[in-house]
Image (spheres, rainbow, N blue to C red):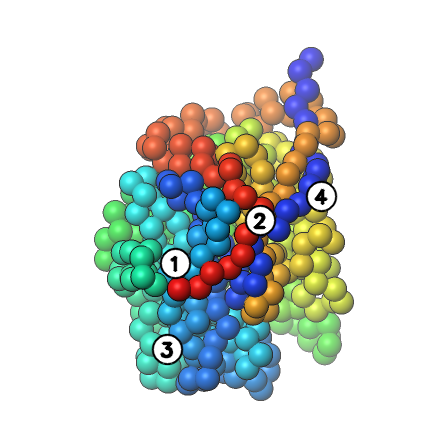
Amino acid sequence: MTEVKMPQLSGIEVLASGLDSPRKLSFGMDGALYVAEAGRGGTGASIPSPSVPGASVFYGATGAITRIQNGNVERVVTGLPSLALPNGSDAAGVSDIEFDANGNAYAIVGLASNPANRDTVLQVPDFSQLIAIDSFENGGSWTRLRDFGAYEQANNPDGQNVDTNLYDLLINDNTAYVVDAGANDLLSLQAFSSEVNLEAVFPARDVTNPFTGEAIVQQSVPTAAAIGLDGALYVSELTGFPFQAGTAQIYRLNAEEQPEVYAGGFTNVVDLAFDQSGGLYVLEYDANGLLNEGDAGALIYLSPDGQTRTTIAGDELINPTGLEIGANGDIYISNKGFVAGQGEVLRLSLEQETCFNQATVNGAAEHWSGLFSRSHLLGDQGAFDYVYNTGGDLDPSMSVVSR
């Protein structure tokens, strides 16, 4: 009987350091790895901090997109908007970069506030936008494509406070999916048109405030989207206050595009990615919960049927924020994402150790309705090649160069 092996960590390399609040990352068709840096804020206009009561976050054009290629690390797009505490931590800014099947680059810019604050206080329209990266030369240039802050202001699908914080971008065929962590929803644009479609709202739940004992509403705070081998969308959540350990879930959107729990028992999840067997990598920002001591995250692997899991990395990760799978199965992680000037990109080398039975994989095919081939799933062989067949030759000896 054939056995399929679970991955285990065999080594970690630091590919880049000195980054300002790195977030999600993605391989381009040139084989380079591109990293979104939320920045360090600045000394400009301020709005209330979304996470520190009584504090303010200040604007500065310190966000960036960094390229890692052939032994070099270079900030190729600079001057993107950023908000952060005075010490540069807890930043909101560019949070993800993705490429379409033709190699065109797109990014999303977060806000973590009511879009009215963007318009009347900050007066920086690039926040809460999907943007097209027009050039990576001479500091880069970009064009605003869609104002998701305006959508939240006009619609507020979850019925909670009006709030937007674009956090994850997924491009599949000719559709862009945007996870809005502030609005608790998943939105899409067909053919990058001007019309925003609501894919799903992620449910709040009733919990107890650990400090007062009162019943409160905990928001979902979705953080990432990925497409499984069944063609369905899977979405992770951070969970809102009080951020309890073991309560974050992975949702699967069913045929009616309603979120159903696929797997639970996670803590403060910020990213996820499927491998070629249908196994799921889940990245936790803080494995103990945000209100508890320690900053260690975790990378967890969930078997293709969702029944078996193993922790690949724990204490090696400090507040990780982004996850990408390389050509040879290596894992690339944005690490130390909370503070400015200390962010890293790590490459995790894996080996296959702990075994589970091939019947597990066969069961996954039954568990997921309609197992598609990848080229059909992504609607484009070039898109498949881009996601799975790039970026295997990065040099670990690198330093950051700004321009």
Residue annotated with mark 4 = 311
Eye-nearest disc, 2 or 1: 2
Q: Which residue appears at 43% of the width and 67% of the height?
A: 63
Using the image, determine if residue 172 lies above or below residue 216. above
Q: Give the distance between the C-alpha atoms of the residues marked 3 and 1, in whole angstroms.
A: 26 Å
| Dot placed on the residue nearer the N-terminal end, 4 or 2 | 4
Name the disc covering residue 76, or none: 1
Instruction: Find the residue positioned furthest to the top.
Output: 1
Disc 4 from disc 1: Cα separation: 34 Å
Report helix, strand or loop for mark 2: loop
Q: Amino acid at mark 1?
A: Val
- In three-dimensional space, the C-alpha distance between marks 2 and 1, rounded to whole angstroms, equals 19 Å
Q: Amino acid at mark 3?
A: Arg
Residue pictured at 68% horizontal, 29% vertical: 352
- At mark 1, the secondary structure is strand
Give the CA distance from mark 2 to mark 3: 39 Å
Give the number of the mark in front: 4 or 2: 2
Q: Secondary structure at mark 3?
A: helix
Foreground pick, 318 / 18: 18
> Earlier along the polypeptide chain: callout 2 or callout 3?
3
Q: Is residue 218 above or below residue 373?
A: below
Q: Which residue is mark 2?
A: 397
Outermost residue toward the left in this view: 194
